[in-house]
């Protein structure tokens, strides 16, 4: 039995997640369900990143203690993902006790390996990113990701991680594992970044500047911040499923996951994850999705309009897997109509209606699982191709029904063709099950009972 452990980035608890955050979790959940379906031992980890200035500031704004505030946001985030059928094996919170313990242990392992030292730092700091910026990273004096925030000039004592020491290690890791960073363009970007040189990185802040965090274990006047807390959630959360088979991340944090994280792990003596996949960004009606622009759509809103299955389907198939994409309700409506209502839903309805009328016996559900083509695509993370290959089977079935005018046929000829199509429908339902768990199960139930029964419309008009 193969092992498959998948993680997503954890979300800041300065606000409730929107569909832009949920995209990654949908893909992770589909891959997780797929691996379980084909018999792997699978584990899915997601959660919330609760320490740091951004979270503390958001709490203060609402007049709450950080802990009260992150409790609230974290539970709302959890409800959001549950509304689209996502139930990870663990929803980790960086305020969890076991995580704090692992971070302290990790830090000391790295410290004892000579990779953490005290230094002073003077630099430009973006509180939104919670990281220092170089002048060349700024656009018009502002952080491109947080254009409304003021860049602070900071000078303070920090503990540093000896990142520069791991340059050759990282280069070899990337060179000898061509799949470690995917897709290819991101891999090239990271090689370019690595070649431009690595500087040691500050991993603590003085307690009087940042109190909401995990104390540095051997100096409680300092607090561990950002990556040396957040990244370690994967080790805490996966436990004996470490190393991760796959970290799913957005392209903005590829660098931390593919260059900093392996260096930290090597330093502390842990195994390196097998792969990091970095996807693109999603816009809504041509704009960045953001609270300040007021164009945020939540997963639960989409689920109440389209249903949880259809919401998962749209983003899995049309989301920013490689390139950035622009999303709109019109586009989701159109895909709902063509791919689901008129596609899968209509096919299931036509075939089960005819089969019920003919009194056909149900299929053996253990007989068929998924096609090799689909399985290979999913295993290779070609998720769009995988979905397209399933939908081309739907089209083929429709074509056969229309070309043979199956509804006019009778007797053995009708039964043989119908049985063949129903077997393909069972393959289709198995292949769509990770994406459309509810609807696919309805199809499977309708065609694998004692007698085949007509299915109610799966995707009603909206
Ligand atoms: Zn920023």
Image (cartoon, grey):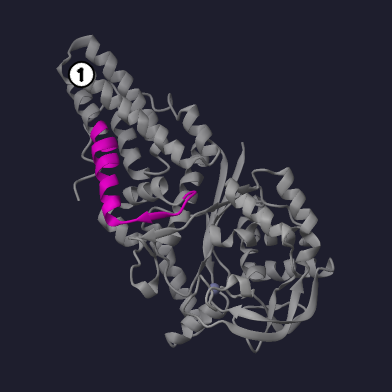
Relative to the observer, which residue lies in front, 110 or 369?
A: 110
Residue 290 is drawn in which quadrant?
bottom left
Relative horizontal placement of residue 188, taking residue 356 as reference (left or right): right
Residue 451 visible here: no
Please identify the residue farthest to the left as the structure is shown.
408
Relative to the observer, which residue lies in front, 208 or 132?
A: 132
Q: Main secondary structure of the magenta part?
A: helix
Residue 316 rendering spot, x and y as whole percentages: 41, 47
- At x 21%, y 29%, the residue is 350
Residue 154 is drawn in which quadrant?
bottom right
Relative to the observer, which residue lies in front, 362 or 31?
A: 31
Relative horizontal placement of residue 436, taking residue 354 as reference (left or right): right
Label 1 neighbourhood size at 10 Å, few (<14), some (14-19), many (20+)?
A: some
Residue 137 visible here: yes
Please tell me whether residue 142 is drawn above or below residue 90 in the rendered image. Answer: below
Relative horizontal placement of residue 18, taking residue 400 as reference (left or right): right
Please tell me whether residue 356 is drawn above or below residue 215 in the rendered image. Answer: above
The N terminus, quarter of image: top right
Residue 146 rendering spot, x and y as whole percentages: 49, 74
Instruction: Note whether ligand 1 is within 8 Å of mark 1.
Output: no
Please tell me whether residue 204 is drawn above or below residue 381 in the rendered image. Answer: below
Q: Secondary structure at mark 1?
A: helix
Residue 384 rendering spot, x and y as whole percentages: 44, 41
- At x 67%, y 43%, the residue is 178
Q: Which residues are magenta?
A: 321-347
Does the stretch in magenta take in 91?
no
Q: Please give the residue where the numbered disc 1 appears in the rendered image.
A: 406
Q: Quadrant of ligand 1?
A: bottom right
Residue 122 rendering spot, x and y as whole percentages: 70, 83
């Amino acid at each position: 039995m193969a092992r498959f452990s998948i993680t997503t980035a954890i979300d800041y608890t300065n606000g409730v997640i929107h569909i832009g955050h949920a995209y990654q979790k949908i893909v992770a959940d589909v891959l997780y369900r797929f691996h379980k379906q084909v018999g792997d031992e699978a584990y899915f980890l997601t959660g919330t990143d609760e320490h740091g200035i951004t979270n503390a500031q958001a709490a203060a704004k609402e007049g709450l203690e950080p802990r009260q505030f992150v409790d609230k946001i974290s539970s709302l985030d959890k409800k959001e993902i549950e509304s689209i059928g996502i139930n990870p094996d663990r929803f980790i919170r960086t305020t969890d006790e076991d995580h704090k313990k692992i971070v302290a242990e990790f830090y000391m392992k790295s410290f004892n390996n000579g990779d953490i030292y005290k230094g002073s730092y003077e630099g430009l700091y973006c509180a939104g990113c919670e990281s220092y910026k170089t002048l060349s990273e700024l656009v018009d004096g502002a952080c491109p990701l947080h254009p409304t925030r003021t860049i602070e000039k900071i000078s303070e004592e920090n503990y540093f991680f000896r990142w520069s020491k791991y340059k050759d290690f990282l280069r070899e890791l990337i060179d000898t594992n061509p799949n470690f960073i995917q897709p290819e363009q991101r891999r090239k970007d990271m090689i370019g970044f690595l070649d431009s040189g690595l500087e040691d990185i500050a991993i603590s802040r003085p307690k009087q500047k940042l109190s909401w965090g995990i104390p540095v274990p051997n100096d409680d006047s300092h607090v561990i911040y950002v990556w040396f807390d957040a990244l370690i959630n994967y080790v805490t959360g996966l436990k004996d499923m470490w190393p991760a088979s796959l970290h799913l991340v957005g392209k903005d944090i590829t660098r931390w996951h593919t260059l900093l994280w392996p260096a930290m792990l090597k330093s502390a003596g842990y195994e390196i994850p097998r792969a990091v996949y970095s996807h693109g960004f999603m816009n809504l009606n041509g704009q960045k999705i953001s609270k300040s622009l007021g164009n945020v759509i939540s997963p639960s809103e989409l689920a109440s309009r389209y249903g949880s299955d259809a919401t998962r389907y749209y983003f899995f198939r049309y989301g920013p897997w490689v390139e950035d994409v622009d999303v709109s309700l019109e586009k989701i409506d159109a895909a709902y109509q063509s791919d689901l209502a008129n596609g899968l839903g209509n096919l299931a309805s036509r075939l089960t209606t005819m089969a019920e009328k003919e009194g056909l016996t149900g299929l053996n559900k253990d007989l068929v699982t998924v096609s090799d083509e689909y399985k290979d695509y999913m295993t290779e993370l070609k998720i769009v191709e995988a979905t397209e290959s399933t939908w081309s089977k739907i089209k083929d079935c429709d074509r056969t029904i229309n070309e043979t005018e199956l509804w006019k046929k009778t007797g053995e000829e009708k039964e043989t063709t119908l049985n063949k199509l129903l077997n393909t429908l069972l393959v289709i339902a198995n292949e769509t099950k990770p994406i459309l768990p509810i609807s696919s199960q309805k199809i499977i139930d309708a065609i694998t009972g004692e007698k085949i029964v007509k299915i109610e419309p799966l995707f009603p008009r909206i």
